[in-house]
Amino acid sequence: MSPRLIPALTATVLFAAGSICLIRSPEPSTNRPAGWPEFHGPQRRNLSPETGTRARWPEEGPPLAWKYTGCGIGYANVSIADGMIFTSGNVDDREIVLALDLAGRPLWRSPSGPAWRRATPGSRSTPTYADGAVYLLNPNGRVAAFEARTGREIWNVDLVERFAARGGVWGMTENLIVEDGKVYCMPGGAKGRVVALDQRTGATIWANTEIEHTAAYCSPTVITHRGVRQWISMTQRSVVSVDVDTGELLWSVPFAPRAPQNALTPIYHEGHVFVASGHSTGGSLLKIADDSRDVTVVWHRRDLDNCHSGSILLNGKLFGAACRNGGKQFYCVDFLSGEDLQIDRTLGKVALTYADGMIYSLGYRGAVSLLEVRPRGFEIVSRFELPPMPANTYLAHPVVFGGRLYIRCHDDLYAFDIRAN
């Protein structure tokens, strides 16, 4: 499949209320920006470069720097770039994307499409920052770009109308990747299973229709394997890889979940990819062929059935939370062999991030734990409780950046000071 070339444009003309407004469009860069510009941060590894953080917390937890109420209802994380914090949420019948400054003061909020009001109402996706703009996928299939400084919409695309997009029971939940002038997303429709949109205009660059299955809830990763840049994600019944330049399907392997919850962002390291799905589907390590045209299964473990929590790879060790048997297994296993290094059954089902030798975990009822990474596992060293909420309210993954631990819970965003004294 060869790409459809789109002429380079540097501005978009919008017509509103009888007036013409010229909005300068962002010039695409070849590299993702610094900071925490997207879901799971730089390269989607969920590894913060932060240093100088506390090794232990007081019994009541680290000091609260500030709390902002007004995010709306939703499960989006935060992205942080250019001195601003971005997230999304439902307010009445609309989803909004909003920006705060680093002191938690509101800068702007803009509508991003109709609110998701069906199964588990609320926003899903974290805004992705690139080149002075933020990009967001609405659960109903609307992709839009906004000026990061003002919130003014630059362009939008209806994925249902253009690609016959098909979301699942919980809507469309992908966190978009923006790179090299393209916005990658997975409509999962007959007219485009995976597509690349022009970063500046929203025009279609390529649309892959080779993939057989519809979109799941997975947020992809983009990696380079032996010189081949490729987008990797999970559909409802497979793991797939697509050439980012042409949209050509490189490889596909069956991966059918026992329940429709393919949500884990794939983890790539030295030719291997870890994927997992919840409810006893399990986790698998795949090995990509040297020519990126095939993939084989190295190992599979049914009890590593990560659902919404995310996994982290550190120095050959894979950390994550399995949801089998009520989510009572936090694991550390060897990445290449899948062998146990340490298992904990006290943390429960938790979301993760990493910084400065520590893993930060957020339980689905609001328990926050600090884990010190050890040569063959981890030690739980601190813990505190956020206000009690119903199960599965604290679903947004924690973020560590700029001396702060950010935790989103529906309408509230907490910023804790985790700097060492």
Image (tube, rainbow, N blue to C red):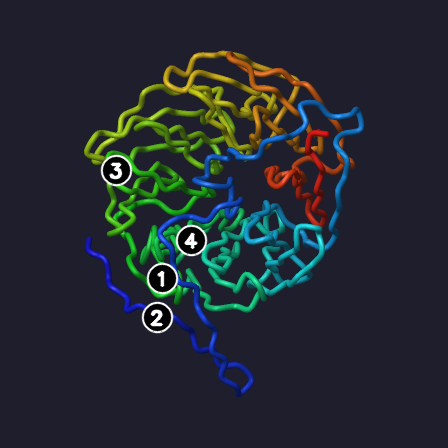
* Image quadrant occupied by the C terminus: top right
- Name the residue type under label 2: Leu
Query: What element does badge 4 sit on?
Result: loop
Query: Camera-side residue: 92 or 77?
Result: 77
Location of residue 190 with respect to 156 vertically, above or below: above
* Badge nearest the viewer, 2 or 4: 2
Residue assigned mark 3? 251
Q: Residues within 10 Å of mark 2 (few under 14, many from 20)?
A: some
Point out residue 206 in the picture as x, y percentages from the top left corner: 28, 57
Nearest the viewer among 218 and 102 is 102
Q: Front-most of 116 and 350?
A: 350
Q: Residues within 10 Å of mark 3 (few under 14, many from 20)?
A: some
Judge the density around disc 4: few (<14), some (14-19), many (≥20) Cα neighbours within 10 Å: many
Mark 4 → mark 1, Cα distance in angstroms: 21 Å
Q: Residue at x 28, y 37 (%)?
A: 252
Picture residue at 74% right of the left edge, 32% below the top? 62
Residue behind mark 2: 9
Is there CB contact under 8 Å for labels 1 and 2?
yes
Between label 2 and label 3, give the one nearer the viewer.
2
Q: Is residue 199 above or below residue 168?
A: below
Q: Earlier in the sequence, mark 4 or mark 1?
A: 4
Q: Earlier in the sequence, mark 2 or mark 3?
A: 2
Q: In the drawing, what numbered circle is on residue 166?
A: 4
Residue at 29 percent across and 56 percent down: it is 207
Q: Are marks 2 and 4 in contact (CB under 8 Å)?
A: no
Q: CA distance from mark 3 to mark 4?
A: 22 Å
Dot 1 or dot 2: first in sequence order is 2
Q: Are marks 3 and 1 in contact (CB under 8 Å)?
A: no
Residue 354 in picture, x, y percent from top left: 56, 30
Of 219 and 179, which appears nearest the observer?
179
Return the residue at label 1.
198
**Residue kind at label 4, given as amino acid type:** Arg
